[in-house]
């Protein structure tokens, strides 16, 4: 198979100046750190590609709408895809396409491509390839896992979910109340801070708890949860922890070994890959779970967790997406390169999210939600504009080439608790290709929209 990213390695390294003084909180655990920088200091030299170099990899960024270059703030719903990912997928489909485990070259190449995808994803998470299963999407994988785990659950057992989560990490577990009579406890979120009530989380976990399902980051509000603590609490009573990392992994590098994760789910289309889901489970768990499977299908991990013929081009694209991320830096092993890329991208997006939060907060009638920029959060800001429905605001902003998602993003309980159902929120997410200029355009666009609204009222 062709080298995934040869041309990226020829890029120049880039020196970037620090925009201002900041304390950046990336999260709570080990893969995550607090970075302090003084007002006068310059950002240390980075070998990670500049945003301008990164942007060249995304053909979608050439799109012009109504005469405006499109600024994609819809990353939390799905990022744009770099050329290399599409090229790897089309190379697979054009030249290596076959079904698995047969004795001719394209089939052997397909086996190798799948093996490679597991290896790359394993390195992405610091896992082993046997611990990586693929599926249609995170939701399908979670339903499948929940149903399989549920076989051993009964009316005596409890599961803990949270109000802050995407419903893909709530409803598959709630379903077990119907199917197995399990009690599902729901941890409340504080609508004023967009964070979980940790006392309630602790109180909800008890000797009957079998599983704690919690998101690493909220796709609606950007809140980052202390998953290390949640995993410890779960393990303290002998329960398992299921981490929805779909909104987390595009912004922070996760280390499943250090965190002692049991299950982690993610979706490649949120980190520059194709539409496919990935499930990590500790090998012993995959081995012990009685997944629904066809009799002739493999009964060993991780394939026992997968059903039917897989989205092989999607697996190839997922590996290419991880390799794309790693390729933005040129020093060290793939994981070391990923670490420096995530570190650098975090610094950049922290500056953007701070500016966006402050800019939006100054506009009358605009209300941002969730934790402020100096709290653990991703660069995703949701907000409302008084007097303008989120659907209408999304449409008006798109006329200026500003593409934002709106609604509840399936984090429906968050929107209900904020008192914003049914219209929900407008959501702006920064990705690796987001520029300071795009953030200014968004602030100006929202500001103009608000001005026009008040003019039309008078
Ligand atoms: C935090 C979070 N969890 C789960 C999902 C569901 O992922 P999928 O679309 O792969 O089922 C999403 C999708 O938006 C998400 O943002």
Image (spheres, rainbow, N blue to C red):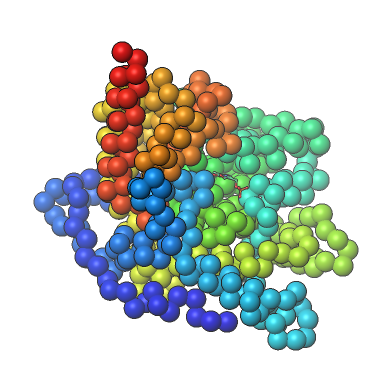
Quarter of the view holding residue 152: top right
255 up-or-down from 240: above or below: below
Residue at point 44%, 72% (across, down): 334
Residue at point 48%, 53% (across, down): 79
| Observer-nearest of 367 and 28 | 367
Residue sticking out furthest to the bottom: 104
| Observer-nearest of 186 and 228 | 186
**Image coordinates for residue 450, horizontal then vertical, percent:** 33, 25
58 up-or-down from 376: above or below: below
Residue sticking out furthest to the left: 40
Residue sticking out furthest to the right: 295
358 up-or-down from 121: above or below: above
**Image coordinates for residue 78, horizontal then vertical, percent:** 51, 50
**Image coordinates for residue 147, horizontal then vertical, percent:** 77, 46
Looking at the image, residue 312 sits to the left or right of residue 48; the answer is right
Number of numbered discs? 0
**Image coordinates for residue 368, horizontal then vertical, percent:** 37, 30
Looking at the image, residue 98 sits to the left or right of residue 362; the answer is right
Q: Is residue 271 visible?
A: yes
Looking at the image, residue 244 sits to the left or right of residue 386; the answer is right
């Amino acid at each position: 198979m062709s080298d995934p990213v040869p041309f990226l390695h020829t890029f120049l390294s880039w020196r970037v100046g620090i925009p201002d003084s900041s304390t950046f909180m990336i999260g709570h655990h080990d893969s995550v750190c607090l970075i302090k920088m003084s007002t006068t200091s310059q950002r240390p030299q980075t070998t990670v590609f500049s945003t301008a170099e990164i942007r060249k990899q995304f053909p979608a960024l050439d799109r012009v709408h109504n005469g405006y270059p499109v600024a994609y703030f819809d990353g939390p719903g799905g990022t744009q895809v770099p050329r290399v990912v599409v090229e790897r997928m089309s190379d697979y489909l054009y030249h290596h396409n076959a079904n698995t485990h047969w004795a001719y070259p394209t089939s052997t190449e397909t086996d190798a491509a799948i093996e490679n995808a597991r290896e790359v994803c394993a390195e992405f998470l610091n896992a082993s390839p046997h611990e990586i299963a693929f599926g249609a999407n995170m939701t399908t994988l979670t339903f499948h896992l929940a149903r399989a785990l549920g076989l051993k659950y009964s009316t005596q057992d409890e599961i803990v979910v949270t109000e802050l989560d995407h419903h893909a990490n709530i409803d598959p577990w709630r379903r077990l109340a119907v199917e197995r009579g399990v009690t599902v406890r729901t941890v409340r979120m504080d609508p004023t801070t967009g964070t979980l009530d940790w006392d309630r989380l602790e109180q909800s976990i008890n000797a009957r708890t079998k599983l704690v399902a919690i998101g690493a980051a909220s796709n609606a509000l950007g809140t980052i949860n202390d998953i290390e603590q949640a995993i410890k609490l779960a393990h303290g009573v002998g329960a398992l922890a299921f981490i929805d990392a779909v909104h987390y992994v595009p912004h922070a590098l996760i280390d499943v070994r250090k965190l002692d994760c049991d299950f982690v789910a993610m979706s490649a289309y949120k980190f520059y890959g194709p539409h496919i889901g990935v499930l990590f489970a500790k090998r012993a768990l995959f081995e012990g779970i009685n997944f629904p499977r066809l009799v002739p299908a493999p009964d060993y991990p991780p394939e026992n967790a997968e059903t039917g013929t897989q989205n092989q081009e999607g697996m190839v694209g997922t590996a290419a997406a991880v390799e794309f991320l790693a390729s933005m830096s040129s020093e060290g092993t793939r994981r070391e390169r990923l670490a420096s890329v995530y570190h650098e991208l975090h610094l950049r997006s922290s500056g953007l999210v701070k500016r966006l939060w402050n800019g939006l907060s100054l506009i009358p009638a605009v209300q941002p939600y969730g934790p402020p920029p100096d709290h653990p959060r991703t660069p995703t800001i949701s907000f409302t504009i008084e007097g303008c429905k989120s659907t209408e605001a999304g449409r008006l902003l798109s006329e200026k080439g500003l593409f934002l998602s709106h609604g509840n993003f399936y984090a429906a309980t968050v929107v209900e608790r904020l008192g914003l159902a049914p219209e929900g929120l407008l959501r702006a997410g920064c990705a690796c290709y987001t520029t300071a200029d795009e953030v200014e355009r968004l602030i100006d666009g929202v500001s103009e929209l608000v001005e026009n609204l008040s003019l039309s009222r008078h």
